[in-house]
Image (cartoon, helix red, strand yellow):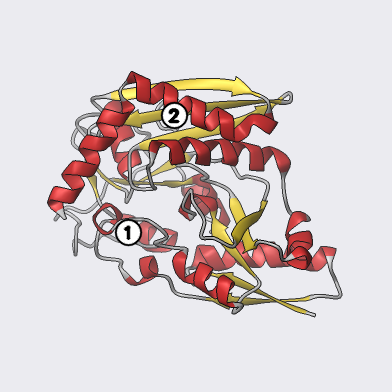
Amino acid sequence: MEVIVGTRQSELALWQAEWVAQRLRRCNPDVVFRIKGIKTRGDHILDVALAKIGDKGLFTKELEYALLEGGIDLAVHSMKDLPSELPDGLVIGAVCEREHPGDVLISKKGETLAELPPGAVVGTSSLRRIAHLLRYRPDLRPVTVRGNVNTRLRKLFEGGTGGMLPDNGLDAIVLAFAGVRRMGWEERISQLIPFSICLPAVGQGSIGIEIRGGDQLIAGLAAQLDHPESRAAVAAERAFLKRLEGGCQVPVGALGEVQDGRLTLEGAVSDLTGSRYLRSSLTGGPEEAEELGTALAGKLIAMGAGEILKEIRSAASLRG
């Protein structure tokens, strides 16, 4: 029996797919797991900020087409790339045990966020990160930097001023800890950014396995890698984002954590500069994950989050 594992063709995505395949091989030595790389729209557009091109399925849609058409048997995703609503016929078969979900700072001279010089240029492709950074340090100069982990590190340490980069290059970049660690660059980290400064993106640090609904054979294989605590945490975050009608490219951060059998969800919504910032949390049972996410979003909407996000979407449509 052969099972085809679909993935994006980026280095990190291929690493994640191989990580999944290796664990499935250990559990199922009689099954052949073959990895198939597929280029997504997001992989083709590297010179434009994500916020300007939209993010609904930017890194997942082509994989989902292949899954629905039978070209692959399961798709491996970074959960933060997966839209909060899946196409009809597809379900999440597993959420693997989560890596630390936070962001990290990698600076040219090893400084932390507090130690960066006034007006330091910080590269990131995320509006969420930009908003959180500016809330903490309004003097920082965020610039858009796209590409995989290795490409962004090269832009930081080897310089270069093309595209969206300033003439004097970058002082630092912000990346997800999980991607940095998986690519073997952990020693480059200058600071693990505290959650008090920057809440992670929804699903960040999690590897998800998407499958066809009703495919009991593949569902059984995927379930072998499911981590209930991680699934509950991510489900709460995704419900939170869905209720806010947001995507990856809005300044929304969330963190679900299961400790001592209780699930705590913390969420934040900000404007693009971090000057208006709303944050709150709720706690409940892991089995209430989606209800918890929806309720926390409602709480922030009552505090004014809806107006903030409406203004951001309106400004984006005018720019477009």
Is residue 63 rendered to the left or right of residue 314? right
User: Looking at this view, is 214 or 250 the one in front?
Assistant: 214
Residue depth check, mark 1 versus mark 2: number of the one nearer the observer: 2
Q: Residue at x 14, y 56 (%)?
A: 167
Q: Residues within 10 Å of mark 2 (few under 14, many from 20)?
A: many
Q: Is residue 306 above or below residue 313?
A: above
Residue bearing the label numbered 2: 297
Residue 116 seen in render: no
Provide the secondary structure element on which disc 2 rests: helix
Q: Quadrant of residue 74?
A: bottom right
- Residue 146 circle label: 1
Whether residue 218 is visible, yes or no, is: yes
Badge 1 amino acid: Arg
Q: Which residue appears at 83% of the width and 63% of the height?
A: 27
Name the spot of residue 290 as percent of width and height, x first.
58, 35
Quarter occupied by the C terminus:
bottom left
The quadrant where residue 308 appears = top left
Mark 1 or mark 2, which has the lower sequence index? 1
State how far apart marks 1 and 2 are (Cα): 29 Å
Residue sitting farthest toward the right: 30
